[in-house]
Structures are given as structure tokens and as C-alpha cells.
Image: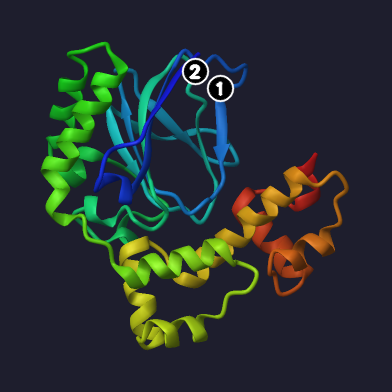
Amino acid sequence: MITQTYIPRFPLNQFIDYFFFYEGYTPSHSVERFLPDGNVELIIDLHDTPKFIYDNETLKEIQACHHVWASGVRTEPISIDSGREAAMIVVYFKKGLAYPFFPIPMNEISDCVVDADLLWGNWFSSLRERMLETSDITSRFEILEDALLKQFGSRLIQNPCVEYAVRQIILHPDQMSFTQMSQEIGYSQKHFINMFKNKVGITPKAYLKIARFQKAINEIEQRGTINWTTISQDCGFYDQSHFINDFRLFSGFPPEQYLR
């Protein structure tokens, strides 16, 4: 398997964590389930074979993706091709900071995977063709970087309230008070919720639930002995019942089954 990572230069690096290339991945499984993590990604498929999204229960194909597509922030798991024999470049946006690159409010693509042509016309398709003119991975990254800077550079302005709110949710999911946050930001809760939803894709409360779920996932992976009551308390859930319900919603499994 070949992998390579590239961190774009300023100001892209204020909104994008990194570009990631992979090729030659050969897992034994054909379908993978991705769990909600608060992220938005842009995927550039360097092969022509379509990739599929599957129903989480039946694993029947429900959507085909071609060449370039965007995946909005998710509040439920998604089952996709495992990436077997694929060659892809993925743009990983910083949490809550993908909005300058999108022509529509982010809530319009939440829980959706959208072909790039429907959002940006043929701009990304043309960019992909340019990237395919070279086989050098770094050169492909640089072509992507230069194009994003030229096309979106004037829009790369952070919303400080949203950036602060997302950062606090990620850092302190177990101690979050939206009443206090609204007071710190200086907006009414209604205005703050609408602004957050427009820029991030979902409400602050929904994003907080995802952050708590991801904290629980990390705790499960790191702890040798699992105590579900302790994990639910440490991750900020109101009680164990809320923890189990949210865990099932975001993963498709109750905690014990997920662990197995």
C-alpha cells in the first residue's frame, strides 16, 4: 500500500488539516462502516470505476460516486467501499471549517454524499484531469493546493464564533454549557444555533453528541477494562441510558456488541 500526506500552505492550512493519498489498499473485506466524527471530506478518485454507498442494514447499493464527491458532516454511520484497489486523494477539512469552500450552507449536505459537479459545476472535474496528467504524488498535491488557493483564497475568512464553539466542544465535550457559550460569544442562543448549523452543518447540540461519542470510542480503545457507567460519566452523558441510545444511533450497535 502506498500512502502520502501533504499539509497545504497558509492560508489553506487554517481550514484544511491535510491532503491524503492512498493506493494499493487490499483489505480482505469489501465494505467499511465509518462512524460520525464531525468531519467533512472531499474525495478525488483517480480511477474511473464508481465507488458505492450501501444501506447500513442490507448492504445493498444505494448510491454510486464518480470521480469527485463531497461528504458532509454525519449524524449516522455510513457504509462504503473499503477502498480495495482504489487510488484516491482525500481533502480532510479542519472540524467545522469547510464552509468557505462550499457554495451552499453546510446543513444542506449534512448526512449526504454529493457529486462535486452538482456543487461546483465541472471545476473539480477539470482539476482532476489536470492532476491525472502527472503520476508524481507531490505534484498532484501541489496542483490541488494551487487550484484551491486561486479559486477559494478570497473566501478563506474564519467565523471566530463558530471556530471557538467547535474548538470548545471538541476539547471539553464532558463540560459543555451552551448557555455559558452563548454569553461568551455575545449572541442569543437562537442566532448562535442558526449560525453554527449554517457553517458546520448540524446544531451545536448534535455536534456535541458526536464529540461525546468520539470521546467514548477513544476511551474504549485505550482502556483495558471496560466499565460502561464510568465511560458514560467521563464522556459527559446525562446517564447510561442516554449513552446507550446515542451509541446505538451513531454506530449502529449497542456498546457491548460494538466492543465484540
Q: Which residue is mark 2?
A: 84
Say few, some or many: other residues with alpha carbon within 10 Å of mark 1 (under 14 / 14 to 19 / 20 or more): few
Q: Is residue 36 left or right of residue 245?
A: left
Q: Are the two marked residues, 2 and 1, in contact with CB atoms closer than 8 angstroms?
A: yes
Tell me the residue at 15%/21% (across/down).
Answer: 130
Q: Quadrant of the C terminus?
A: top right
Q: Position of residue 116 (x, y in %)?
A: 23, 39
Tell me the residue at 36%/68% (across/down).
Answer: 162
As drawn, the residue found furthest toward the front would be: 10
Q: Position of residue 37 (x, y in %)?
A: 52, 51
Look at the numbered disc 2 and give the secondary structure of its residue.
Answer: loop
Tell me the residue at 16%/42% (across/down).
Answer: 149
Q: Which residue is mark 1?
A: 30
**Could you say which quadrant of the image residue 173 lies in?**
bottom right
User: How many numbered circles does the render carry?
Assistant: 2
Closer to us: 186 or 28: 186
- Asked if 245 appears above or below 146 in the picture, the reply is below
Q: Give the residue type that dot 2 points to.
A: Arg
- Asked if 130 appears above or below 239 in the picture, the reply is above
Q: Position of residue 180 (x, y in %)?
A: 51, 85
Q: Is residue 9 visible?
A: yes
Q: Position of residue 159 (x, y in %)?
A: 29, 67
Q: Is residue 47 visible?
A: no
Label located before the other in sequence (2 or 1): 1
Q: Give the residue type that dot 1 points to.
A: Ser
Q: Is residue 146 left or right of residue 226?
A: left
- Asked if 53 appears above or below 197 in the picture, the reply is above
Q: Is residue 85 left or right of residue 8?
A: right
Look at the numbered disc 1 and give the secondary structure of its residue.
Answer: loop
Residue 43 numbered mark, or none: none
Give the alpha-carbon distance from disc 2 to disc 1, as whole Å: 7 Å
